[in-house]
Amino acid sequence: MWAFAATVDAERSIAYLPIAGPAANYYGGDRPGNNLYANSIVAVDSLTGEYRWHFQIVHHDIWDVDMPNAGTLFDFDVDGESRPAIAYVGKSSYLFVLDRVTGEPLIQVEERPVPAGDVPGEYYSPTQPFPVRPPPLSRVSFDAETDLVRAEDTNADHVAACLDVMERAGGFYNEGPFTPFLYKGGADDPPRSAIQFPGGTGGVNWGGGALEPSSSLIIVNAHNGPLTGWLEDRDPNGNYGNGTRGSNQPYDRGSISGPGPYSGYSAPMGGFDEQGNGIGPNLPCFRPPWAELVAVDASRGEIAWRSVLGRNENLPEGRQEVGGTGSAGPTVTAGGLVFVGATNDRRFRAFDTASGEELWVTGLVGAGNANPMSFATRDGNQRVAIIAGGELMVYGLP
């Protein structure tokens, strides 16, 4: 469990533990099968630790989908009957709604076929669990013909640079959700790069969801960053990820960007010069929006609204509202506001809870990659606060 907190139903003395994926992140041939309790919500008695139930979100994780948060407690309405529920959405961007006493899905979950790869010795789960609704909150597939960034999104030089990156990667293989990495057999073999959406950072990351209880709206920061690359034979003198020199894992993840856990699909806005150096900032190579604030009616399993979250000032006026990445989540107040930082544009925003309209924005001293806090002062005035750039920023509500 690497998430910073568990969710607790204090009335029923149940703690919901978000258990992460097993190592290594991208190869699991040494752990065939679904890997019980990994990538699962595990409910335990919060006073004794006794096991109550578990629900696995991902079988045999080879995508670094992990469990970055434990979900949101709310009352699920079924034909006028209220059921205690927990709603979970993580890096895969699929939202699951479960009875928090039994673990039973309150919105149907189906096992659907997913693609298999060709890495020697790997086990591929033939199916994965999918909720029948709502649809995924982030991008889960990529088709270059329709999803590649266009000149009207950024500029022509950026599009040309993105096409160059794709060509050097040997194209990007994608078969939809849970596309696996392919095997690149030797140093002289051409790249066989897959592109996975969402990538290793989500989807919805550690910040999780915020609840507006009267409407069962669960609101999340959902971003669309991909992960690209392949698996290749491990360099015996190299690393499998951070601090694992000497690992006995047979494969490393490689990519045209070199080794390392995360490599998205981006290219310089000004293209490449004659020496192959990038000109200008890197921008994603898929069509925006690149991050959104998304509200889901969790009792109905329906998306209530989506709003672009974040701007990119490297783009011309009129094209800047494209979304900006970040892992934190929002906070909802009883006054009908959603506050969120999270974006890499160093801004703090308030949205209308019911409609998703952006109502207020202010600059921060750094990226506010923390969930906002709301509290009352001794004289009864409401404040909202966020940590950004190592400072605590506090604002008053009217």
Image (cartoon, helix red, strand yellow):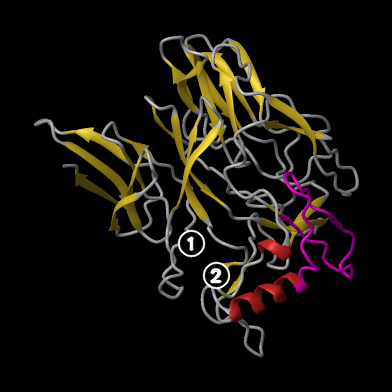
> Label 1: few (<14), some or many (≥20) within 10 Å?
many
Provide residue 6's location: percent of width, then percent of height.
48, 26
Q: Quadrant of the C terminus?
A: top left
Q: Is residue 320 left or right of residue 363?
A: right
Indicate whether 49 appears above or below 254. above
Q: Examine the rendering and report whether any part of residue 388 can be seen.
A: no
Amino acid type at mark 1: Val
Q: Which mark is residue 322?
A: 1
Quadrant placement of the N terminus: top right
Residue 311, quarter of the rendered image: bottom left
Helix, strand or loop at label 1? It is: loop
Which residue is pictured at 40% across the width and 61% down the height? 345
Please provide the residue range marked out in magenta. 167-195
- Label 2 sits on what residue type? Asp
Which dot marks residue 313? none
Q: Quadrant of residue 64?
A: top right
- Image x and y of residue 300, in percent: 53, 27
Q: Is residue 168 visible?
A: yes
- Percent position of residue 265, x then y: 65, 64
Residue 382, quarter of the rendered image = top left
Disc on the earlier residue, 1 or 2: 2
Instruction: Give the residue at mark 2.
Output: 153
* Pointer 2 local density, CA inside 10 Å: few below 14, some 14–19, many at least 20: many
Placement of 73 over or under 248, stated as above or below: above
The chief SS type of the magenta part is loop
Residues tagged 1 and 2 counted as in contact (Cβ below 8 A): yes
- 154 or 7, nearer to the observer: 154
Q: Which secondary structure lies at badge 2?
A: loop
160 part of magenta stretch: no
